[in-house]
Image (tube, rainbow, N blue to C red):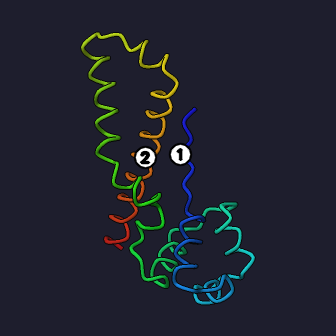
């Protein structure tokens, strides 16, 4: 099974530290208690969309930034799509994909590509929804 768990908490932590905010100050600013914020940052609970919007606004970052993985990974979306299209093209053309899946490294690459593509799609959709609101 491919993991699609997002690292929103890790992203929040990195941004919060870079902007020199404490958990307590950030939690107070967005109207939740520190314990709840700690659970969000620890990826133990998923924040609501309004909470995500408040976090992004307070931290002065685009909402999509909370969903992105490391910058290097975020720029690899086209490579991820190319990997998926190559596999799909092989399946459609009747080329055997057995060798592809026998190679554990390539299998892991595909899983990571799908995970990153999914995260990017979710972030894009949330960004669209917030612009409509």
Query: 65 or 125: nearer the eye?
Result: 65
| Residue at which label 2 appears | 118
Query: 64 or 13: nearer the eye?
Result: 13
The C terminus lies in quadrant: bottom left
Query: How far across and down, in percent of the image, does residue 11 sit?
Result: 53, 66
For residue 83, side relative to residue 59 (left or right): left
What is the secondary structure assignment of the residue under circle 2?
A: helix
Q: Quadrant of residue 24?
A: bottom right
Residue 66 vs 119, above or below: the answer is: below
Q: CA distance from mark 1 to mark 2?
A: 7 Å
Query: How far across and down, in percent of the image, does residue 43 sit?
Result: 65, 61
| Residue at which label 1 appears | 4
Q: Residue at x 49, y 28 (%)?
A: 105
Residue 130 vs 1, above or below: the answer is: below
**Quick check: marks 1 and 2 in contact, CB under 8 Å?**
yes
Q: Residue at x 42, y 13 (%)?
A: 99
Residue 31 vs 64, above or below: the answer is: below
Query: How far across and down, in percent of the image, does residue 19 sit?
Result: 52, 84
Query: How far across and down, in percent of the image, does residue 52 sit?
Result: 51, 72
Q: Give the number of the disc on residue 111.
A: none
Q: Quadrant of residue 71?
A: bottom left
Query: 103 or 91: nearer the eye?
Result: 103
The N terminus lies in quadrant: top right
Q: Residue at x 27, y 17 (%)?
A: 92
For residue 15, side relative to residue 34 (left or right): left
Residue 81 vs 70, above or below: the answer is: above
Number of marks in the rendered image? 2
For residue 38, side relative to residue 117 (left or right): right
Identify the mark nearer the N-term, 1 or 2: 1
What is the secondary structure assignment of the residue under circle 1?
A: loop
């Amino acid at each position: 099974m491919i993991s699609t768990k997002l690292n929103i908490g890790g992203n929040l932590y990195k941004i919060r530290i870079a902007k020199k905010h404490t958990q307590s100050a950030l939690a107070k600013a967005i109207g939740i208690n520190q314990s709840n914020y700690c659970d969000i940052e620890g990826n133990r609970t998923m924040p609501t969309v309004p909470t995500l919007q408040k976090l992004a606004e307070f931290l002065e970052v685009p909402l999509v930034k909370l969903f992105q993985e490391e910058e290097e990974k975020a720029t690899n979306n086209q490579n991820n799509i190319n990997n998926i299209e190559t596999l799909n093209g092989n399946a459609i053309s009747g080329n055997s994909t057995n060798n592809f899946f026998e190679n554990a490294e390539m299998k892991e690459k595909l899983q990571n590509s799908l995970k990153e593509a999914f995260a990017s799609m979710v972030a894009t959709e949330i960004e669209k929804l917030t612009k409509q609101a």
